[in-house]
Image: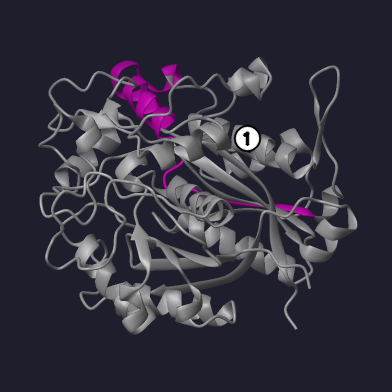
């Protein structure tokens, strides 16, 4: 019998706010976090908008000296992890400001999804290399830029000594990290796992690169809040975002033994590969659909037991109708009874961070009995014919929710969360 895994803490640094309360309030209000780019001057770019994290002061969570040795994506992850641990009751802050983990450090693991690493560090170091030569490069270029340093720094700051892994499956990274965390607990290798995703790549190189792929929205620079419009007939691409979403996962036995408040059950995970194309999903939606089917099987749930599907929903020409087919593949006729929505309409596409955000949104939906809206859905694409909760939050009981993610390379991941019921 599989060991039951539960969620006891959540932390978020996002374009919708830097706390769970701010994040939930924005979701219910249908408020966009997308604005003109301020992290660099986007003059001359076809795309001048993004979902930036605002009012983020890393020294609220991290010693100033330590923060200077971390790239932005690492700072996000360390901050969100501490908030998640605090909610879980697994972190103590001493008078000197040092954090102390309250779980067995040898039984506490970390799995973080990340797609690109410290991209602002790469950008700056390349500029110095080409303009001034190798001796002017940032001394900490390598340890700041590599994707695993978020997990590494988190382990150092918190003192966790279990596995510290980094999952890199492009835009599915955050969701796949959660699945790997689930498996670590079920296997008995860990009692507690910090899992989720983090990303910070709003830099000229990334905007330029995605711009050249013709995947970013470019026709609503003058009204950025309306640019991300999943499933809408007038969509023209995704909006790049950033941030981190981290969850504290525990075995049910461990959580109950210490009297933790349990937020939800993490019931299942499924993954698949399309084996089709480096940037496009399989046209029939069967690749991502298989990941959902596997996640439902892992959770011992029928499709009819699920009320909400949190969509990858990127607002691109190819993704949205294909994901609609994917949902139909997995849920059959029940797809038309599901509530489906994409919070990327509000956050933008935060690459690996999205899997963490969307898992948290799914749990908040279960706990609060609400369906986050898909904003900017003014006229649905005829190929997108499900109930996408257009523009306004809806309310109703949710026993189970599925969140799906798709990544370049054909990576698909899906996770299932349930309302927690003690045996």
Within the image, what quadrant is residue 193 found in?
bottom right
Q: Measuring 54% from the left and 44% from the top, which residue is drawn there? A: 245
Going by the image, does 189 lie left or right of 288?
A: right
- Count of numbered marks: 1
Pinpoint residue 175: horizontal percent, then vertical percent. 50, 59
User: What stretch of residues is rendered in magenta?
Assistant: 108-136
- Which residue is at 80% across, 60% downward? 191
Q: Nearer the viewer, residue 352 or 66?
A: 352
Bin the neighbour count of mark 1 within 10 Å (Cα to Cα): few under 14, some 14-19, many 20 and up.
many
- The reply to whether residue 145 is in sight is no
Q: Secondary structure at mark 1?
A: helix
Q: Percent x, y for residue 140?
A: 54, 26
Seen from the viewer's position, the closer of residues 318 and 361 is 361
Quadrant position of the N terminus in the picture: bottom right
User: For mark 1, what is the residue?
Assistant: 78
Q: Residue at x 62, y 49 (%)?
A: 247
Q: Position of residue 216 (x, y in %)?
A: 20, 43
Outermost residue, front side: 396
């Amino acid at each position: 019998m599989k060991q039951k895994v539960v969620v006891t803490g959540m932390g978020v640094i996002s374009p919708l706010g830097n706390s769970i309360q701010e994040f939930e309030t924005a979701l219910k209000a249908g408020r966009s976090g997308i604005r003109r780019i301020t992290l660099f001057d986007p003059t001359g770019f076809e795309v001048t908008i993004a979902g930036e994290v605002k009012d983020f002061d890393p020294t609220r969570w991290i010693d100033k000296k330590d923060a200077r040795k971390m790239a932005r994506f690492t700072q996000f992850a360390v901050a969100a992890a501490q908030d998640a641990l605090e909610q879980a009751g697994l972190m103590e802050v001493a008078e000197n400001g040092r954090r102390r983990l309250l779980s067995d450090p040898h039984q506490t693991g970390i799995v973080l999804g990340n797609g690109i690493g410290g991209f602002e560090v790469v950008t700056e170091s390349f500029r110095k290399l080409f303009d001034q030569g190798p001796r002017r490069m940032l001394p900490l270029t390598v340890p700041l830029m590599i994707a695993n340093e978020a997990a590494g720094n988190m382990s150092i700051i918190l003192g966790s000594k279990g596995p510290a892994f980094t999952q890199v499956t492009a835009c599915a990274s955050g969701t796949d990290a959660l699945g790997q965390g689930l498996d670590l607990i079920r296997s008995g290798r860990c009692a507690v796992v910090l899992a989720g995703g983090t990303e910070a790549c709003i830099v000229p190189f990334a905007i330029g690169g995605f711009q050249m792929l013709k995947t970013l929205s470019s026709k609503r620079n003058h009204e950025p809040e309306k640019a991300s419009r999943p499933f809408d007939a007038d969509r023209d691409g995704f909006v790049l975002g950033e941030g981190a979403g981290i969850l504290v996962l525990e075995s049910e036995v461990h959580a109950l033994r210490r009297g933790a408040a349990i937020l939800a059950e993490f019931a299942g995970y499924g993954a698949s590969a399309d084996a089709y194309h480096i940037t496009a999903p399989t046209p029939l939606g069967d690749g991502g659909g298989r990941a959902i089917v596997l996640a439902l099987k892992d959770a011992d749930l029928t499709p009819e037991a699920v009320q909400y599907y949190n969509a990858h929903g990127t607002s691109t020409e190819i993704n949205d109708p294909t994901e609609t087919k994917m949902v139909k593949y997995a849920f059959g006729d029940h797809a038309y009874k599901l509530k489906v929505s994409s919070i990327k309409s509000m956050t933008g596409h935060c690459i690996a961070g999205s899997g963490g955000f969307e898992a948290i949104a799914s749990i908040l939906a279960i706990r609060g009995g609400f369906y986050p809206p898909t904003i900017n859905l003014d006229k649905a694409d005829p190929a997108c014919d499900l109930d996408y909760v257009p523009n306004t939050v809806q309310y109703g009981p949710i026993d189970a929710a599925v969140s799906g993610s798709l990544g370049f390379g054909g990576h698909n991941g899906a996770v299932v969360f349930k309302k927690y019921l003690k045996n």
